[in-house]
Every structure is written in C-alpha cells, then in structure tokens.
C-alpha cells in the first residue's frame, strides 16, 4: 500500500504549547495538492446540462420495450429528450407549490423516470431568499415495515414520485403522512379509485403523463450553490429508526470527479461510447454516484427489467461496457461459472485451470489485460465474457469487501479491469478505492476531494 502514498509533511516536535505530530502522507495521485471542484460546477445539474450541450443526440436512458409479455430491444431517450422532459417535470413540481427548501421523495425500482426526477431536484435549488434547494429523498421499504411512513414524516416530504406497483404501499400509510405530503405522482398510471382514496385525505394524485402536461419548457432555473443540500439518504444505522444522511452538492460532485480522476490515472475515463447496466438500487448512494458519473461523461444507462430471472438476458441484449455489482452478486456469478466448469468434464476443467493459471501469472508480472493471454481469452474465457454481453471493460464492486479469490477470478475470467470501492453513505460511497488492473493486491488508497479543506 505504501507504494501509492507520498510524504507531504515531515513530523513535528512539540513546540510553544502545540503537541507533536507525525508525518503527513497523501495518495500519489494527489501529491501536489488536494483536488478542487472547478468553479463552473455548482451542482450535479451542471454535469447533466454540459453533457446535453456536448452530445444532445447521444442515447442517455434506455429500457426494453415489452410487447405481448415479451421484452424486445432497448428503446432510448437522448440527452436532449431527457433534458426537455426534466424541464417540464421541474416546472410542474413548482406549480404544485413545492418551493426551495422542501423535500421530495422518490419510491421505486430503477427506471428512466427515477433519473429524470433526480436530476430535477438537483436543478431546483436555492433562491436568494432562503438558500435551500428542493431535496430529493429516496424511499425504500427494506429498512423495515414502517420505513416509508417514517421517512416521509421525518424528512417532511411534500411530494412523492412513486412507481406504479408501489402505490398501494403509499396509500396504506397515507393517513399518517398528510402533515406535509400533499402530492403523489405515479411513474405510470393511477386509477380513479386510488385518486379518490388520496383526495379524501387532501392529497392530489397524478399519473406521470398528467403531471408532465402541467409543466413547460420556459421556466427559469435559479442559481445553484455547492452548499445546497442535494439529497437526504436514509440508512439503517446501528439501532433504532433509519438515519438520514444529508449530502450537499459539493460533496456529491467531489466524489464523482474523484472517480473520474482515478480512472484517468489508472485505466481509462468514461466516454460517450460507454454503456452502463443499471440494476443496483438507486435508493443507495453507490449506484447514484456511478450513474451520475455516467451522466457527467455523457455515457448511456440501460435499465434492467426488475426481474432477476431476466438479468442475464438483459445483459446480453444491452451489451454494457461498465458493470457495477456487490459481493453477493459476484459470489453468485463465481459459483455459477465454477459449477459449469466442474460439470464440463475433466478435460475441460484441466484446460480451464491451465488457462487460468497462465493468465494469472502474466497479470501478476504486470501485463495489461489485453496482453496477458489474448489467445486463451478467445479460446477459454470468451464464453464467460459473452455472459455479460461481451463488451464489459470495467467492473466495479462496493458495499462490502470482495473476497480475494473472487476478485482474482473475475479479473482473469471476465477479461476486464476490476475496481473495489470502500466508504459510507456519509462519504458519498467511496473514500478508498482498490484498483486491480494488473497487480492483483496492491491497493490504491484514493482519498476523494476534500470538500472543506479545498474550499471548492
């Protein structure tokens, strides 16, 4: 690990009442100074708007179209189309009396509307009189039976965007949430019966189409500040009720830009040619940071169908270049591949083991992925790579440590770079980054932008 640090300050003896201090070390990628957020970025909205200007026609958000119960190819919204929709939804939110400083909940699985709504809440920010943005608050029920009700009340949520299948869960607890909640917007349709049930409690309900029609493209966007609250992310904590983590625009952007810098130093930055496969929960900080990074780089984001049975099929159809998972997902992948290798007979198993050991030795010598065993990649490992769509160049893992044997296995068999991140919701996900391009277990310790010290 010390190969990736540099001493920037010598130790100091006690003097004039000041205590002694040891030497100060810093990551080699920030040896000259801590990074600062460029002045042109005041909120994640600036990431989005810049990508719209650079690549308005590039696909941004995609999902598979379902016809007669069967999923077809991915259909895409371009950056410009998403931008226009975002402006309309933002205008409609303001028309419902949601002002800067209010909180807006989002409840549902990953889908394009989730991202559109999230971008809006980053956009509607401080007006000079109050200095607060409209803050988006992800809602999810895995924190406990009453978590949604608790978060709505605790965060004082005044408007909620809800996936159609989650509407019943909101309506069940609605009678206990009307102190602040006045508007519900379904990502899909909403029945007359559901509308009546909500309206009886003083809460207005709209479908996505109805709500979008209330907005326009001409509304002015107020100025943004890094100190505005970007989101409140609720986590389980250790005891008691879920804990709300307040993250401002500066912290959120710092993590995204740090990820970009690390990829520049160690591998390859994202581009508009990259495609990300979105299946991890957007209600967690991990996937939000990764997807915001893709938006920053102008990449495309394709969403899974939300059914684990079709996850591999979605991967094969999308053919992503970036795949993000957690150790439990990678462990299942590892087990599935090893079961197939064992079932293939002794000859195939021996060939696989020979290829595995040969490539691993070359990687440990410092050879790059594409140089370690190009022939064996085609003959032995290509089928495994095709299981991810055939184009994955970067795998990311987070949320928990990835076992060493699985990390090694994925790097060898999936023929791509694998990076691990470690951090907390409070640190926007990654405060340390373990990058495995060639040498498996040399860990690059990457401290992201120090937002307070850099005075960005």
Image (cartoon, rainbow, N blue to C red):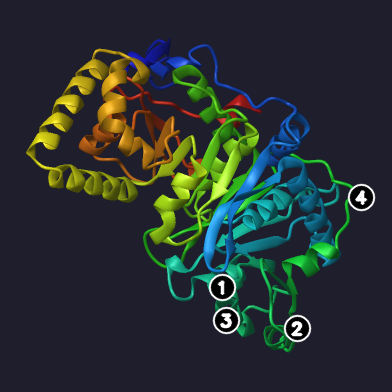
Residue visible at 28% across and 32% down in the picture:
381
Question: Is residue 1 in sight in this rendering?
Answer: no
Label 1 and label 4: CA atoms lie apart by: 32 Å
Screen quadrant of the N terminus: top left
Which mark's residue is nearer the viewer, 2 or 1? 1
Horizontal arrangement in the rendering, residue 30 relative to residue 41 (left or right): left
One can see residue 44 in this view: yes
Q: Earlier in the sequence, mark 3 or mark 1?
A: 1
**Numbered badge on residue 202:** 2
- How packed is label 2: few (under 14 Cα within 10 Å), some, or many (20 or more)? some
Q: What percent of the width, then of the height, locates residue 409? A: 24, 34
* Image coordinates for residue 35, horizontal then vertical, percent: 58, 22
Q: CA distance from mark 3 to mark 1?
A: 12 Å
Q: Earlier in the sequence, mark 2 or mark 4?
A: 2
Q: Nearer the viewer, mark 4 or mark 3?
A: 4
**Residue 77 image position (x, y, % from top left):** 69, 47
Instruction: Tell me, yes or no, whether the two marked residues, 3 and 1, touch with CB atoms within 8 Å.
Output: no
Q: Is residue 296 left or right of residue 361?
A: right
| Pointer 3 residue | 173
Is the Cβ of the residue at disc 2 closer than 8 Å to that at disc 1?
Answer: no
CB contact under 8 Å: marks 4 and 3: no
Estimate the spatial distance between the alpha carbons at disc 2 and disc 1, rounded to whole Å.
Answer: 20 Å
Q: Secondary structure at mark 1?
A: helix
**Label 2 vs label 4: CA separation?**
30 Å
The answer to whether 179 is drawn above or below residue 347 in the figure is: below
Q: Residue at x 49, y 24 (%)?
A: 263
Side of 190 where 65 appears, left or right: left
Report, in whole angstroms, how far the alpha carbon at label 2 lies from the one at label 3.
14 Å
Give the labeled residue for mark 4: 218
Q: Of the residues under marks 4 and 3, which one precedes in the sequence?
A: 3
């Amino acid at each position: 690990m010390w190969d990736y640090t540099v001493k920037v300050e010598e130790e100091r003896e006690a003097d004039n009442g000041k205590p002694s201090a040891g030497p100060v070390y810093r990551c080699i990628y920030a040896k000259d100074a801590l990074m600062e957020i460029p002045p042109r970025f005041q909120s994640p909205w600036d990431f989005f708007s810049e990508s719209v200007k650079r690549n308005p026609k590039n696909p941004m958000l995609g999902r598979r179209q379902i016809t007669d119960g069967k999923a077809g190819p991915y259909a895409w919204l371009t950056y410009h189309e998403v931008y226009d929709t975002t402006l309309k939804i933002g205008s409609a939110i303001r028309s419902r009396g949601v002002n800067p400083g209010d909180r807006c909940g989002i409840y549902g699985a990953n889908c394009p509307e989730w991202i559109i709504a999230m971008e809006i809440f980053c956009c509607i920010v401080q007006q000079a009189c109050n200095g607060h943005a409209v803050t988006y608050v992800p809602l999810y029920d895995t924190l406990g039976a009453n978590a949604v009700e608790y978060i709505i009340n605790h965060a004082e949520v005044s408007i909620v965007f809800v996936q159609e299948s989650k509407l019943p869960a909101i309506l069940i607890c609605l009678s206990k949430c009307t102190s602040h909640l006045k508007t519900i917007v379904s990502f899909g349709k909403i029945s007359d019966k559901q509308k009546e049930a909500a309206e009886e409690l003083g809460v207005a309900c709209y479908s996505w189409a109805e709500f979008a029609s209330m907005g326009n493209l001409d509304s002015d966007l107020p100025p943004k500040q890094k100190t505005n609250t970007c989101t409140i992310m609720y986590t389980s904590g250790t005891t008691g009720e879920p804990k709300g983590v307040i993250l401002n625009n500066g912290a959120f952007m710092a993590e995204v830009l740090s990820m970009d810098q690390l990829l520049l130093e160690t591998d390859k930055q994202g581009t508009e040619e990259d495609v990300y496969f979105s299946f991890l929960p957007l209600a967690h900080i991990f996937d939000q940071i990764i997807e915001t990074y893709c938006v920053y780089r102008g990449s495309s984001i394709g969403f899974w169908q939300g059914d684990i049975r079709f996850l591999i099929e979605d991967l094969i159809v999308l053919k992503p270049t970036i795949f993000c998972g957690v150790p439990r997902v990678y462990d299942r992948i590892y087990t599935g591949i090893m079961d197939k290798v064992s079932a293939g007979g002794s000859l195939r198993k021996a060939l696989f083991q020979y290829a595995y050991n040969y490539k691993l030795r070359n990687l440990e010598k410092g050879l790059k992925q594409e140089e370690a065993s190009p022939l064996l990649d085609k003959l032995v490992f290509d089928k495994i790579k095709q299981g991810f769509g055939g184009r994955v160049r970067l795998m990311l893992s987070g949320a928990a440590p990835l076992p060493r044997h699985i990390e090694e296995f994925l790097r060898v068999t999936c023929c791509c770079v694998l990076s691990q991140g470690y951090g907390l919701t409070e640190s926007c996900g990654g405060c340390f980054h373990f990058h495995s391009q060639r040498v498996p277990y040399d860990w690059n310790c990457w401290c992201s932008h120090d937002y307070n010290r850099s005075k960005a």
